Image (cartoon, grey):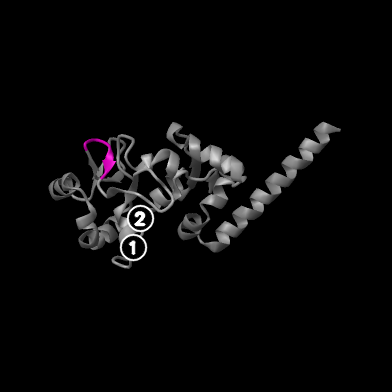
Amino acid sequence: MLISTAILTERFCCDLEACGGACCIDGDAGAPVTLDEIAEIEEALDAVWPQMSASAQAVVDRQGIAYTDPEGELVTSIVAGKDCAFTYYDKLPGIERTCCLCALEKACREGRSRFLKPISCALYPIREKRFAGGLVGLNYHRWAICEPAVRKGRELDLPLYRFLREPLIRRFGQDWYDKLCQVADELAKASNEDRMDNDD
């Protein structure tokens, strides 16, 4: 596996008060999904249908819950060229502004379905890429709308891989995550030693 060092060194913590969940409605394609995830979303569709907008329902009726984007990747259907079909708008406790939220996640957390949301959504801003021979690469996707999350992460001194602990474990397992933490600790130690040497 290839892992960008930025995942271990950069600070990040989503700030919905600042961004309003813009990553779910900004862009030109839906969220990457696997065939297995498509099957799980289809199974959860009845539970999330009432939460979806009439426009989203029409899109799903017409083309299904996913389509193939110009790069040949399966992605969730989108509305008006941007909004994920499974988004809805509401306010969260402690946040004054209306945010873009995930109907799939809401249904799962309320016990109405078993599928949380696509792993590509849960892992963002980490992007997973598959190469020939089964090699997997993990990159940190930098996006201007996430600048508030970078600022908040730096204020909290929260590394990206720590912020995304649960989805990383969900995707790769506890043992893999524990090893990632060890690599991050070793990298931080080496960086501190280099800094001390330079100070001398």
Residue 108 marker: 1
Q: Can residue 61 be seen in this view?
A: yes
- Circle 2: is it few (<14), some (14-19), or many (20+) Cα within 10 Å? many
Q: Is mark 2 on a helix, strand or loop?
A: loop
80, above or below 171, in the image? above
In the current view of this chain or complex, which residue is farthest to the right? 200
- In the image, which residues are magenta? 80-84
* Type of the residue with mark 1: Cys
Picture disc at residue 63 = none
Q: Earlier in the sequence, mark 1 or mark 2?
A: 1
Q: Mark 2 points at which residue?
A: 117
Q: Tell me residue 74's x, y (percent).
A: 29, 46
Image x and y of residue 122, in percent: 42, 51
- Please check the rendered image and state whether residue 187 is part of the magenta-colored stretch, yes or no: no
For the residues carrying marks 1 and 2, which lies nearer the camera in this image? 1
Cα distance in 3D space between marks 1 and 2: 8 Å
Does the segment drawn in magenta span residue 83? yes
